[in-house]
Image: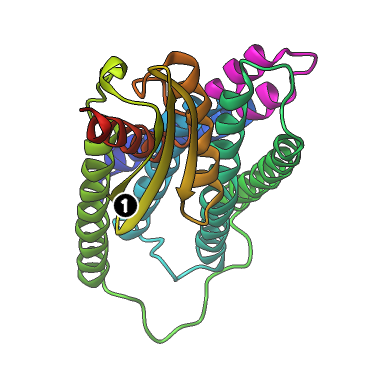
Amino acid sequence: MLTKTGRRWLRVIHIVFVAGLLGGLASILIVNGLTNLNTREIFVANYSIYTLFNLVVTLAFFGVVTTGVVYSVFTHWGLTKHWWVIGKWLGTVSLFILVWIWLGPAINGMVALSDIARDSNRVPDVYYDLKGSLALVIWLSLLIMCFLIAITIFRPWGQRTQKYEMKRSMVLVLVSIAIVLGGGLGILGYLDLESYRNMKISSPDLTRISDGMYTGTLTHTGFEYAVAVRVKSHRITGVGMVKNRESKFAQWAEGVLPRIVDHQSPNVDGITGATTTSKVLMKAVETTLEGAIK
């Protein structure tokens, strides 16, 4: 059990994470509400939202959950002894679903679409659909946060009548297993993504490539991406997809293809929010051009 001083420090840390989560969500809502922006400013706004989500909201959320578990396990409140504690966990699960299944994909989609459109004068209509859903999910998340804060303060519903309370040792074992498995899989996934994001993309010598249409493929996570590159008078005149994943993010990553034509090189900036797939497509184009060199 935590000492009185330990509980105070844990409570302070928990409140800091809660404040960070509330502040991050509120800041995203404010930035998302900005109007009368040109396409470049829209991208800057969405990149700010993307950064806030990944650096503030994500870290604060896991901080809230971690300190909440510690506070429940190492104090007399327990995990299931009181109805208000159960209510907090149900609210936390609901918040997790909203944030990572709805909010996260919406933010990635918005930053990807605004990145594609930053050199043009029009953002696609689907962007505004995501913008509206983003505002809705943040308001719902803030309402859940207010609900969680309220039941923490007032502790309603009393103590639950029960015959069994999960032992602290069992909780620690389960939490440790979850951390090891989740952390391990997360690290492996992160390293795999980083290996692609940090791939070196070269600029093949176009003067050594004859006119024609060339195709090439690259495999990533078990899927084969196929591209076609047209070369005329030692210039890239067109790049298209032959095969791509049935995914919105994979399709948005195709926004990198016009950049390759504009810069006459596969070594261009990727699409924010679809960085990994963008890099795979760039590498596929590079491989195709390298194979066409005579």
Spot occupied by residue 111 in the image (x, y as percentages of width and height): 57, 30
Residue extent of the magenta highlight: 28-48
Q: Is residue 209 left or right of residue 242?
A: left
State the residue at coordinates (40%, 49%): 65
Give the quadrant of residue 203.
top left
Spot occupied by residue 169 in the image (x, y as percentages of width and height): 20, 69
**Main SS of residues in magenta:** helix
State the residue at coordinates (55%, 32%): 112
State the residue at coordinates (74%, 13%): 37
Question: Total label count?
Answer: 1
Of all residues, the one furthest to the bottom in this rendering is 163
Give the quadrant of residue 213.
top left
Above or below for 143 versus 229: below
| 285 and 75: which is toward the camera | 285
Q: Amino acid at mark 1?
A: Val
Q: Which quarter of the image is occupied by the C terminus?
A: top left
Give the quadrant of residue 158.
bottom right
Spot occupied by residue 247 in the image (x, y as percentages of width and height): 52, 53
Q: Is residue 229 left or right of residue 29?
A: left
Q: Which residue is mark 1?
A: 70
Spot occupied by residue 99 in the image (x, y as percentages of width and height): 55, 47
Asked if one can make out residue 20 in the rendered structure from this viewpoint, the answer is no
Indicate the secondary structure of the residue bearing disc 1: helix
| 292 and 155: which is toward the camera | 292
Q: Which quarter of the image is occupied by the N terminus?
A: bottom left
State the residue at coordinates (35%, 34%): 285
Q: Is residue 75 left or right of residue 155?
A: left
| 38 and 77: which is toward the camera | 38
Q: How is the image coloured?
A: rainbow
Asked if one can make out residue 206 in the rendered structure from this viewpoint, the answer is yes
